[in-house]
Image (tube, grey):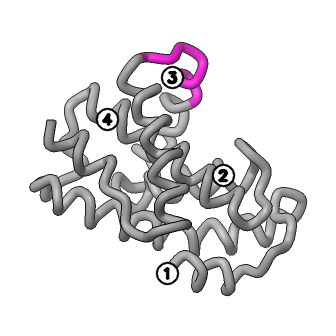
Amino acid sequence: MWEWVKGMVGRKKFDDDPGKVIEAGGVFSKGIAAQLLIQFTGAGLDDPTSLAEDKLKFFCGYVAAFSDVMSQSVNGQAGGNLSQTVTVRVFQEFFGTERARNLMQMTFEWMATDPPAFVEGMSTGGRDGNEFISRGMPNGLANYLRS
């Protein structure tokens, strides 16, 4: 699946072209949100908006790292414009624009303070992002949410 998405956007440098960042961010965020929704369903959660605080920290770290790996797979810069655009757009898919803005701000704060659940989410999201590219559907988010 990811090869198909990568084929849609090509292998250009995105971080220097705002139009491409917005276009690719839309494509990537929908694909990532669909993959995350499968994991939510697998964890038995129907409503991602009702996550407890630690699970929300994990989720935000997971999305940030997963989105960063996906962005880098098409020559996006680590932590760059494409990665951040994809992250906030994934948040929007689940929580709407206003809450997504708030979650992005919290994500930046948590990156600076390293709460354990967020750090674990970043680690799992990065690992799952690489697994998604190389082998297909990961399940790190679902496993954490079930715990």
Which kind of residue does numbered mark 3 sit on? Trp
Q: Which residue is mark 1?
A: 1
Question: Which SS class for mark 1?
Answer: loop
Q: CB atoms at circles 2 and 1 under 8 Å apart?
A: no
- Is residue 41 rendered magenta in the image? no
Magenta stretch: helix, strand or loop mostly:
helix
Q: Is residue 102 visible?
A: no
**Residue 16 x/y as whole percent:** 89, 59
Determine whether the residue tagged by mark 2 lies in a helix, strand or loop: helix
Residue wearing tag 3: 110
Q: CA separation, marks 3 and 4? A: 11 Å
Does the magenta run of residues contain 111?
yes
Instruction: Give the mark, 1 or 3, whose residue is nearer the N terminus.
Output: 1
Q: Which residues are magenta?
A: 108-115
Choose between 69 and 133: the one closer to the eye.
133
Q: Locate residue 98 relative to residue 14 in the image: left or right.
A: left
Asked which quadrant contains residue 116, the reply is top left
Which residue is identified by label 2? 83
Report the Cα–Cα distance between label 3 and label 2.
Answer: 16 Å
User: Helix or strand or loop: what does disc 4 sit on?
Assistant: helix
